[in-house]
Image (cartoon, rainbow, N blue to C red):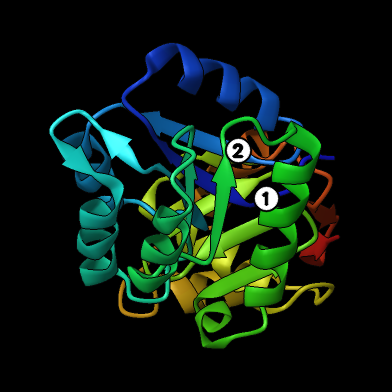
Amino acid sequence: MKNTFHLTLIDDDRNFLQVLGIALGKKFSSTAFHTKDAALKFLRGNATDGILLDVHLEGVDGFEICHEIKTLDRELPVFFMTSDPNIDLIGSGFRSGGVDYFMKSTGIEELSSRILNRLEALGADAKSANILCRGDLKIDLRSQLVFGNGREIKLTPKEYDILKIFMDCPGRLISKAQLLDLLWSDVHVDANNIDTHMYHLRKKLSGCVTSIQTRKGHGYLLRT
């Protein structure tokens, strides 16, 4: 099973980005960008667990980008990488807010393990209060993005609301009447609407180990 951590990769070498994304794919999902502006635009509207950032990009250095990233999310961990052997850059990386620093020659197993260990350690901090995890499903409550088995799952607003109800109460049996009351308390909605939304939601979750199961005549529950 893939880890549900998502990395944003920023490097102006497109070939390196492609190879890096494939190599990291065993442990992370990732989205890659070769320009600062494209990366920052993504970060303004999407959730990520960490940034893997080149120190030297065309026309701008990674330390400046790190500063801009920190204005968006002060707690977001930034990992620097470079092929520049100048040892003074390591100190600059940490002073600018980086949590680790890698040479591009670092083996992929060491790179993956160090990033994974750091992200897991950071998972115990206050930021984790914004992340709701059940099995291989994860909801970022700030951005309302949903991830399952290492991939983003696109949900409609109502599907998101339904899933969050079950994520808040894993293993608890929830009836159609309860769902109707929670989701449409101020209007009358036919119970068949629940069946329709549930059908599409479960279809989108079909690749995940965690699932919403039916108890015929009683309702549904989330199984991890």
Q: Is residue 55 above or below residue 210?
A: above
Q: Are the residues tagged 1 and 2 within 8 Å (C-beta)?
A: yes
Q: Nearer the viewer, residue 17 or 223?
A: 17
- Give the structural element (helix, strand or loop) at label 2: strand
Type of residue at label 1? Thr
Q: Quadrant of residue 128?
A: bottom right
**In this figure, which residue is indicated by the disc labeled 1?**
4
Q: Is residue 19 above or below residue 193?
A: above
Q: Is residue 159 above or below residue 124?
A: above
Question: What is the C-alpha distance between the residues marked 1 and 2?
Answer: 7 Å
Residue at screen point 31% across, 79% down? 186
Assign the C terminus to one quadrant of the image: bottom right
- Asked if one can make out residue 207 in the rendered structure from this viewpoint, the answer is no
**In this figure, which residue is indicated by the disc labeled 2?**
29
Q: Nearer the viewer, residue 149 or 103?
A: 103
Q: Is residue 14 left or right of residue 169?
A: left
Q: Is residue 118 left or right of residue 12?
A: right
Q: Residues within 10 Å of mark 1 (few under 14, many from 20)?
A: many
Q: Is residue 125 above or below residue 81?
A: below
Q: Residues within 10 Å of mark 2 (few under 14, many from 20)?
A: many
Residue furthest toward the top? Answer: 15
Residue at screen point 48% across, 52% down? 87
| Percent coordinates x, y for residue 73 in the rendering | 31, 70
Earlier-in-chain disc, 1 versus 2: 1
| Percent coordinates x, y for residue 47 in the rendering | 41, 55
Residue at screen point 80% across, 52% down? 210
- Give the structural element (helix, strand or loop) at label 1: loop
Q: Nearer the viewer, residue 191 or 208?
A: 208
| Percent coordinates x, y for residue 7 in the rendering | 52, 45
Type of residue at label 2? Ser
Q: Is residue 206 left or right of residue 34?
A: right
- Asked if one can make out residue 164 in the rendered structure from this viewpoint, the answer is yes
